Amino acid sequence: MKGKILGLVWGLALTGALYPQARLAPPNAPNAVARQGESEIVINGTNVEKDIAVWVNDAIVAHVFQKTTEKIIVRDGRNIVHLAETTPKGGVWNIGDKKQVVVDSVSNRVTIRPLMRYGRLINTEIQQTIAISPRPRSSEQGSLAAARALPAPEPVQTFQPARNPEPVAVRNPEPVQTPRPQIAADTTIEGAVYRAAEELIQVLPRNSTLAIISIASRDRDMSDFVIEELAYLLVETRKFKIVDRKSLDAIRAEQDFQFSGEVDDNSAVSIGKMLGASIVITGSISGSGATRRLRAKALDVKTAEIMAMASERF
């Protein structure tokens, strides 16, 4: 009996040493709802295999366990959200690099999804933004996150582009493409990819066969992410044909080049001809910190001329 008790005590002590008992932030009330002047931010960690720490305007507001979601109530306005993976080590939480996303909160619910590659948090994306009807304020206390004192968010400035007052009748309208909310204005790599894709889409001829040859970067995971996201956005327009990644892999092995490495224009055009593409896209990610930039260009396979270029900061 004494041996069993000692074993149990030892097991509990070992568990405590391997996995911290205290969360980095108390749990937010799952049934909390936004009131007037507030919005909701939902962290979707259902496909994430690590705990995620969340900051809003530099104040830590959530510790989202892996495979779960958590709702955070914030004030309306511009909110700067940071996410970082966190893992237990030596009885404490080891926090990784923070990834930022800007959320314009205007009585809405914004769902943020962490993006992980090979077990590492490489970025975040705004998965969904929907309008909500906040409840009127009362004497009741809101969620724990709302009760925390967060720095006052920056006011949101809304710019309305000039519109033609009379609708133009189009006999064969293009399929309506719903832009991803917030992405066009954010400062993440996904926002840069989205804006670069928009610039290319406006110039490239319809029904072209495109091959995304390479995005040069020191970070192979980020290079792969940009290629996959760019291909997805181009396919989503239903205007182009995209060369399958497997065909690119075969040519890559034959030509001994990496998607994350530099490929000169002549080599890119040559590879495009092998793949049967009419246009090839290459690019690079350069800089560091707040001065990183994604550059992409489209080359005509027949003439090797540059058809379109995009340069986006993130």
Image: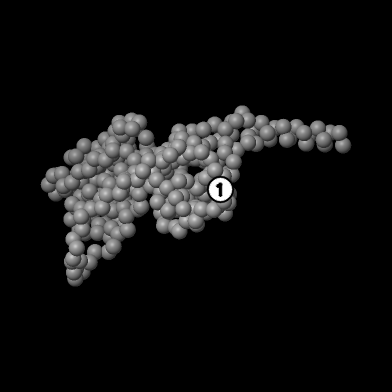
Q: Is residue 182 above or below residue 24?
A: below
* Vertical order, 172 against 62 (above or below): below
In-image side of 8 versus 125 (left or right)? right
**Is residue 104 visible to us here?**
yes
Viewed as shown, does residue 29 lie left or right of 80? Answer: right
> Could you say where residue 186 lies in the image, as x and y percent from the top left?
34, 44
Secondary structure state at the residue bearing disc 1: loop
Q: Horizontal and vertical percent for residue 47?
A: 50, 49
Q: Is residue 168 above or below residue 130?
A: below
* Residue identified by numbered label 1: 143
Apparent side of residue 237 relative to residue 73 in the rendered image (left or right): left
Kindly identify the residue that appears in the image at 49 percent across and 36 percent down.
Answer: 59
Quadrant housing residue 293: top left
In this view, the residue farthest toward the right is 1
Q: Is residue 140 left or right of residue 182?
A: right
Callout 1: few (<14), some (14-19), or many (20+) C-alpha neighbours within 10 Å?
many
Count how many numbered circles sit on residues in the image.
1
